Image: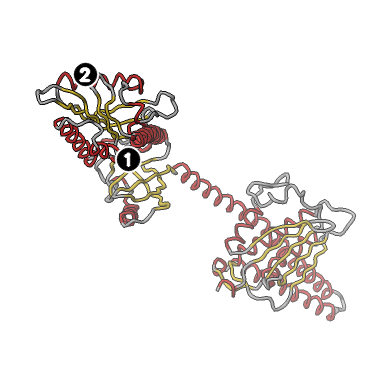
Amino acid sequence: MRPYHLKIARDVHGSLQRTFRLGRSFDFPELQLIYETAPIGLAFLSTDCRYLLINRHLTEICGISVAEHIGRSVRETVPDIAQQVENIVQTVLRTGEPVVGIEVNGQRPDKQNAERFWTTNWHPLKSPEGTIIGISVAAEEITERKRAEAALRELNETLEQRVKEETQERIQIWNVCQDLLVITDLEGKFLKVNPAGTATLGWHESELLGNSSQWMIHPDDRKQALAETERLAAGRILHRFGVRFREKNGSYRWLSWRAVPHQGRIYATARDETEQKYAEDRLREAQQELEQVSRQTTLGAMTGSIAHEINQPLSAIIAHGNAGLRWLARKDPNLDEVQKALQHIVGDGLRAADIITSIRGMFRKDSHEKLQLSVNDLVREVLTLIHGDLDRRQIVFQSELHDALPKIRGERVPLQQVLLNLIMNAVEAMSAVTGRERQLTIRAALNERINVRVTVEDAGNGIDPAHLDHIFDPFFTTKSNGMGLGLSICRSIIEAHGGKLWALPRSPFGTTFFLTPPSAESEQ
């Protein structure tokens, strides 16, 4: 009971004692005023538990008026709490001492109100001879407080249950997670490690806890790892960081870390990417081998074309030389014909020299350096190599090379390899064409964005639309003897130069390949 209410209860008890000593009745005005104005429930019971006095606050217990209480027993008015009251009164009568802080609860007889609670104090009123003549009762209703306590208790129980469930969930996640989960201090000393961490690296938990991770990190990665730890200690979040951790058997595993600092600790997770790293290395090696095979294949094709191109002027030189000798061997040498033959020999020799110069240009030392190049020159150099092959395969060739195109920047040989591959693919695509011209068209012009664009068009049977999105995929081929690498390597070369390579169907027949290398100005 509140201190203020306790004081009221003591004042009421004192007034009752004075009233009894003075021989006044219980309807004494002063006593009635205290009863009616008190903010708590008040009553005075006889030793047989009948109401001699009661105020309005306490009548709410049973829902009947003050007058209807006087002279009636507690069992008649509030049977739900009668037993509790009678037990307390018997205790006071037996001991002669007050009983305080007793909680009483119940409902009205009509059951119209919910369960209610009161904190009560019971003080005996004694005659001068010491005989107990009645019990002074003070009651403070605590129903709302009890309901609030019950709601809070239920909420606490709910929260406690939820905490237990979430804790169990976290424990299960911690235990079953295949990624490494660790908690460290700001210096990187292990405070907690999940089972995946010990299983992945082979160390027992006792060998890790309390120790820094620095001794486990690959020597080449320690400096960067220490720098990342310092950033975490400064409050920064680590989004991804790959580092090699030593296993107990002495080997290293690649771990990709993510971490966040919080309240003096670092919470981190790591994914084992060792197998992925090894797979990437193997794939990179395979790609390099395949590119080498492709270069060798291309080189073989180029060698055949070179031999064919050089063989033509050499054969012509031999033919014209023999003709000149025949004209000189006549009885009357025809010097005019000899002169023509010699002129043809000179022309064929110059043609052979041009071919050799072009070949040397493709393989000279600066061919692997990124230089400012002319697209038209690249196209002409490649065409010089395969001109004879185009004639042999009955290809009707057309070139539209616009003048004054801006320079591009790139490596000469790879770009020539791309052009050669696209042209040879176009030639092969028309090998089975009959009944129409085997038309090959190469254009070099500016596109709508004022960038250089090269197109290679053929009049073959075209590419199946279902395959068009896959022709640049590694190992995808529609040729019976193809490796499926040429176009994939071509796109890789162009994209490495910052350009694009794609293909579209050509109407009414064939396919058009588009190539847009970056201009020298855009790279600068």
Residue 49 numbered mark, or none? none
Whether residue 126 is visible here, answered yes or no, is: yes
Q: Is residue 64 above or below residue 401?
A: above
1 or 2: tag closer to the N-terminus: 2
The correct choice, above or below, for 30 with respect to 113 in the image is: below
Q: Point out residue 271 in the picture as x, y percentages from the top left corner.
A: 43, 43
- Element under disc 1: loop
Left or right side of 499 for 63: left
The color scheme shown is: secondary structure
Q: Which quarter of the picture shows residue 6?
A: top left
Task: Identify the residue shown where x is 84% and y is 81%.
Answer: 336
The Cα–Cα distance between marks 1 and 2, rounded to whole angstroms, is 84 Å
Is 83 located above or below residue 26 in the figure?
Answer: above
Image coordinates for residue 314, horizontal then vertical, percent: 73, 67
In the picture of the structure, the residue carrying the numbered disc 2 is 90
Depth check: 197 or 358 in front? 197
Q: Could you tell me which secondary element the residue under label 2 belongs to?
A: helix
Write down the quadrant of residue 388 in the picture: bottom right
**Residue where numbered disc 1 is placed:** 250
Q: Residue at x 73, y 46 (%)?
A: 478
Residues tagged 1 and 2 counted as in contact (Cβ below 8 A): no
Q: Quadrant of the C terminus?
A: bottom right
Q: Residues within 10 Å of mark 2 (few under 14, many from 20)?
A: some
Q: Along the horizontal axis of the image, is 151 left or right of 94?
A: right
Q: Nearer the viewer, residue 270 or 17?
A: 17
79 or 403: which is nearer to us? 79
- Whether residue 214 is visible: no
| Residue at 10% in and 26% down | 128
Residue 135 x %, y %? 21, 26
Hey, what amino acid is under mark 2? Gln
